[in-house]
Amino acid sequence: MSDHQDYDLIIIGAGSGGVRLARMSAQRGARVAVVESRYLGGTCVNVGCVPKKLFVYGAHVSEDLEDAAGYGWSFPRDQVKFDWPTLVANKNTEIERLNGIYGRMLENAGVTVIQGSATLADANTVVVGDDRYTARHITVATGSWPVIPEVPGKECILTSNEMFYLPQLPREAVVWGGGYIAVEFAGILAGLGVQTTLLYRGDMFLRGFDDDIREFTAQEMRKKGVDLRFGVTIEAVESDGAHYDVILNDGSRLKTGLVMAATGRRALIDGLGLEKLGVQISESGHVVVDEHFQTAVPSITALGDVIGTPQLTPVALAQGMVLSRRLFGDGNGEMDYRCIPTAVFCQPNIGTVGLTEAEARKAGHQVSVYRSEFRPMKHTLSGRDERCLMKLVVDAQSDRVLGAHMVGPDAGEITQGLAVALKAGATKAQFDSTLGIHPTSAEEFVTMREPVA
Ligand code: NDP
């Protein structure tokens, strides 16, 4: 290997983590290139967070129209029409705008974008088509890809990737899985008028979330007409070209117009040639790194979904900043994976930060639980039977708030502020001494006086 390298850093993957690492590193004076085979912005911008949230907004309009009557608005129901291709086209325009912004951000930072699929020829050389590029550091930031379980008829099953470009909405749909993507798409489809059935293999979906939140979400989703079926899974899918027959493990069959799997995502490392170079891959298929994002090969680092940390955009962004500082800055700073706030944009939304009640008890805390369940003010006039749940998990000895959980409108917006409080180590007494903002749902978080457990 000669001393001269084409770049200081080549990043494979222009998703959230890769782009942040590229920009930060270029701003520190590094010569940076990013190789990308699909679209700038990765999953989040193209087939994840952003288009999903736009679809969630679109789906919620149906409820807003119904709720309007209680506020005195009336319009002929037969004049209310929804056009799916319009929503998809407008979403596509917005995504293209964001792709352009990403491109300009990289260009303005002086980052070279190389279009194509990358393979690692050696620890310092990336091959894209017929071209070879060398770099002192290489970062794998290739993200993740949806997984469909191996069942007969698997080829008939869609994933979130295709759902974002569906030409037509079916009348009925089956969503397979019980995690973030399954509940979010079940809410989108149901909101847009599709008869939606969600199939989950376990007793209660949303494993890992607080048990009260899981049950409450199930109750509210059922009220909105989503057919939630737990303890079942798909054994096979048959198709006559127009409709699908879903064969379940209990022997029953479901006829539907669409089957979508939201059964997890795997690290996307196909064709990179990492193992050949000595980069370790875990049993779950993730790139193994230490706390500094370092693989077993000194010049190769990795970050984002590909390393198996929580598959969340803000996690990848933070990792990009930490790694850039390590490679080209003062080296200070490390990732703190505690208290990662998150929202699930099912309907109603879930917001959560910190420990669940079960996690707190398992960790040995003596726990006090505060709960508030109520009808959001908006629905006193709309008449909608939708309720909101808020819950605080408190360490009874130190009074520290360990977890805050919510199901209800704007849960994500509300939880972001609570995350600051929890990260700062706020106590329940400090929550109590904080004045509410009236009238809001959020004020319930500072007015829960009596523990329920
Ligand atoms: P998740 O890991 O969240 O959920 C996967 C679901 O599929 C689980 O319910 C799981 O069941 C089930 N499942 C897995 N394998 C099988 C199988 N072989 N047969 C039947 N069911 C199966 O994955 P998602 O695909 O929903 O999302 C991936 C990640 O993307 C999330 O974990 C999250 O980090 C991120 N994301 C974040 C969002 C946000 O921030 N709002 C939105 C969307 C995604 P079980 O619980 O029994 O294992």
Image (cartoon, rainbow, N blue to C red):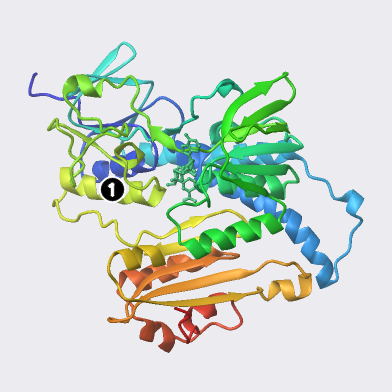
Q: Position of residue 422 (x, y in %)?
A: 35, 71
Report the residue at 85% width, 67% height from top. Answer: 73
Kindly state the secondary structure of the residue where label 1 is placed: helix
Q: Given the current orientation, which residue lies at the most extreme front position? A: 250
Tag 1: residue type? Gln
Q: Quadrant of the N terminus?
A: top left
- On the image, numbered disc 1 is attached to which residue? 319
User: What residue is drawn where x is 74% and y is 43%?
Assistant: 195
Q: Position of residue 336 (x, y in %)?
A: 26, 57
User: Looking at this view, is 85 or 199 the one in front?
Assistant: 199
Relative side of 224 to 79, left or right: left
Position of 262 relative to 366 (above/below): above
Left or right: where 12 falls relative to 52? left
On the question of residue 217 being in view, the answer is yes
Label total for image: 1
Q: Residues within 10 Å of mark 1 (few under 14, many from 20)?
A: many
Residue in the image at 58% along x and 40% along y: 232
